[in-house]
């Protein structure tokens, strides 16, 4: 959530004044200007504090627009996919997002930036803008989304050889974790010093994390965030991933948010609990006072069921992502929904009327949080505006039903490229560029010969 002493909204002049006071009062010497790219990777610039402050008034903070068409491997699509000429775009720091970077010795700040063109137009292919645009659609309807993400990740031994399988790290006992230890307290305590740093770093950055527990995989953890506004939670997940990476490196292990990093282990998800409230009263619009589910609740689920399969490229953005979506690993394979049912794509927890919500279990931990939240909320929005009725909830295992999600990246790209209604909500320019970036990543993956192929095909075919 925003820093407690930050005004809820700023005019440009107030933002400059607030940022100047914030930086000077804390003796900040450097500022990291962060921009989340298509993969959720932090891009941007690091500036001396005085350069950052002078850039606030003379538009000195710039990046090339192509930062948003960069693939996860650092390459670019072969064809021209942006309408501009890859000129400069201008960074506009969000004053509410400024925070200390707690792992540096020098007093350093980080701030997340929105991006605009020279004429003031927002850069519509920016992931943060895509989420903001979806939230404006909700605002125009008198709705306010509430989001609570749950983020899973693995700790693994340092591994410099990408051909060598990842392994669980050595804990305080001096032994690696081999078996699964879901909700094991002692298994978490194996890495107490690391998680003490994680919590200290989160506290210093006002990241509103709630509970930590051990998940089903070897050295797999889950952190839950308290519910709040979607943009604030997307910012926090974006910063949290970076925080965990840095804390793990300090303790000579890797933290990975890959969707499926280890063979024979569960994958890592980013489950998203979502509901809609009246912004004036705070009343949950998914249930009446006596707990009766509303039309908006049903339609929201109906929209998720209809449109999320077309949006899977935003929830499963990498070739590795689809390895998670298999039977019997607590990951969904279809769009059924059920009450307190973790085998389906959409789970409705048993809760009080004021907490009525839907848990979207499709997204991988590797997803860009801005785009995953934008996609999930966009699908729910379409359901509510089109009044789409959902199927009946199932009571048994979702794994007895057919696999109805894309099984690999090309299928997800194709569905996304033909999702006309979704493109209207997310923005056609963004969708075109995003699909091109993912096509380029798939092409790069196709050039790689895996160890499995060498193992089983080299001398047998």
Image: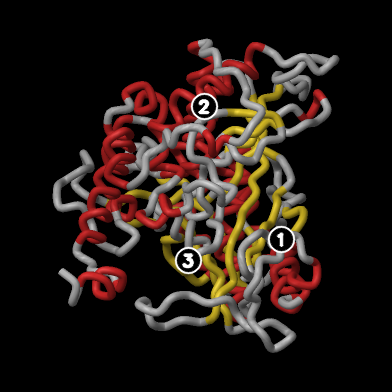
Q: Dot 3: within a 10 Å radius of its alpha carbon, few (fewer than 14), some, or many (20 or more) residues? A: few
Callout in the foreground (3, 2): 3
Q: Nearer the viewer, residue 139 or 298?
A: 298
Q: Nearer the viewer, residue 156 or 74?
A: 156
Q: Please tell me how many numbered marks the rendered image carries.
A: 3
* In the rendered image, the vertical position of residue 364 relative to residue 27, given as above or below: above
Residue 113 rendering spot, x and y as whole percentages = 49, 51
Callout in the foreground (2, 1): 1
Q: Quadrant of residue 460?
A: bottom left
Q: Which numbered disc, 3 or 2, marks the residue that appears first in the sequence?
A: 3
For label 2, the SS is helix
**Residue sitting at the far front:** 460
Q: Which numbered disc, 2 or 1, marks the residue that appears first in the sequence?
A: 1
Is residue 17 in view from this perspective?
A: no
Q: Is residue 78 left or right of residue 199?
A: left
Q: Quadrant of the C terminus?
A: bottom left
- Residue at which label 3 appears: 263
Q: Dot 1: within a 10 Å radius of its alpha carbon, few (fewer than 14), some, or many (20 or more) residues? A: some
Q: Is residue 16 left or right of residue 313?
A: right
Residue 412 rendering spot, x and y as whole percentages = 33, 40
Task: Determine the CA span between mark 3 and mark 2.
Answer: 30 Å
- Residue at which label 2 appears: 304
Task: Determine the CA span between mark 2 and mark 1.
Answer: 29 Å
- Residue at which label 1 appears: 182
Residue 321 rendering spot, x and y as whole percentages = 42, 52
**Residue beneath the point at 33% across and 47% down:** 408
**Residue beneath the point at 41% across and 54% down:** 39
Question: Mark 3 and 1 residues: CB-CB less than 8 Å, in contact?
Answer: no
**Residue beneath the point at 19% across and 64% down:** 447
């Amino acid at each position: 959530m925003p820093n407690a002493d930050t005004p809820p909204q700023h005019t440009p002049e107030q933002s400059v004044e607030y940022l100047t006071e914030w930086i000077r009062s804390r003796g900040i010497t450097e500022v990291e200007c962060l921009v989340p790219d298509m993969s959720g990777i932090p891009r941007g610039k690091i500036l001396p504090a005085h350069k950052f402050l002078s850039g606030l008034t003379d538009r000195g903070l710039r990046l090339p627009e192509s930062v948003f068409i960069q693939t996860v491997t650092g390459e670019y699509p072969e064809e021209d996919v942006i309408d501009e000429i890859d000129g400069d775009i201008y960074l506009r720091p969000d004053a509410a997002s400024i925070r200390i970077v707690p792992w540096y010795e020098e007093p350093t700040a980080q701030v997340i930036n929105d991006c605009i063109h020279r004429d003031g137009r927002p850069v519509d292919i920016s992931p943060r803008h895509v989420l903001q645009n979806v939230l404006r659609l909700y605002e125009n309807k008198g709705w306010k989304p509430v989001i609570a993400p749950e983020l899973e990740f693995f700790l693994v031994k340092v591994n410099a050889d990408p051909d060598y399988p990842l392994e669980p790290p050595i804990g305080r006992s001096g032994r690696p974790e081999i078996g699964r230890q879901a909700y094991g307290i002692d298994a978490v305590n194996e890495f107490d010093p690391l998680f003490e740093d994680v919590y200290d770093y989160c506290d210093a950055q006002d990241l509103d994390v709630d509970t930590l527990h051990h998940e089903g995989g070897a050295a797999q953890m889950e952190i839950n965030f308290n519910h709040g506004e979607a943009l604030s939670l997307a910012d926090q997940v974006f910063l949290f991933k970076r925080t965990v990476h840095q804390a793990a490196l300090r303790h000579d292990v890797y933290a990975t948010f890959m969707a499926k990093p280890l063979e024979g282990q569960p994958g890592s998800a980013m489950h998203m609990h979502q509901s809609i409230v009246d912004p004036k009263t705070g009343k949950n619009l998914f249930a009446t006072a006596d707990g009766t589910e509303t039309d908006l609740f049903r339609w929201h689920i109906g929209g998720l069921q209809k449109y999320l399969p077309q949006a899977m490229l935003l929830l499963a953005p990498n070739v590795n992502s689809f390895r998670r979506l298999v039977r019997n690993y607590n990951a969904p394979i279809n769009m059924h929904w059920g009450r307190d049912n973790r085998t389906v794509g959409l789970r409705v927890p048993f809760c009080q009327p004021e907490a009525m919500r839907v848990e979207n279990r499709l997204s991988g931990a590797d997803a860009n949080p801005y785009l995953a939240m934008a996609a999930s909320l966009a699908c729910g929005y379409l359901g509510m505006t089109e009044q789409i009725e959902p199927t009946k909830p199932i009571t048994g295992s979702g794994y007895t039903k057919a696999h109805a999600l894309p099984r690999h990246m090309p299928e997800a790209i194709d569905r996304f490229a033909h999702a006309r209604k979704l493109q209207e909500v997310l923005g056609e320019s963004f969708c075109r560029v995003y699909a091109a970036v993912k096509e380029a990543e798939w092409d790069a993956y196709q050039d790689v010969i895996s160890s499995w192929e060498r193992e089983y095909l080299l001398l047998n075919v």
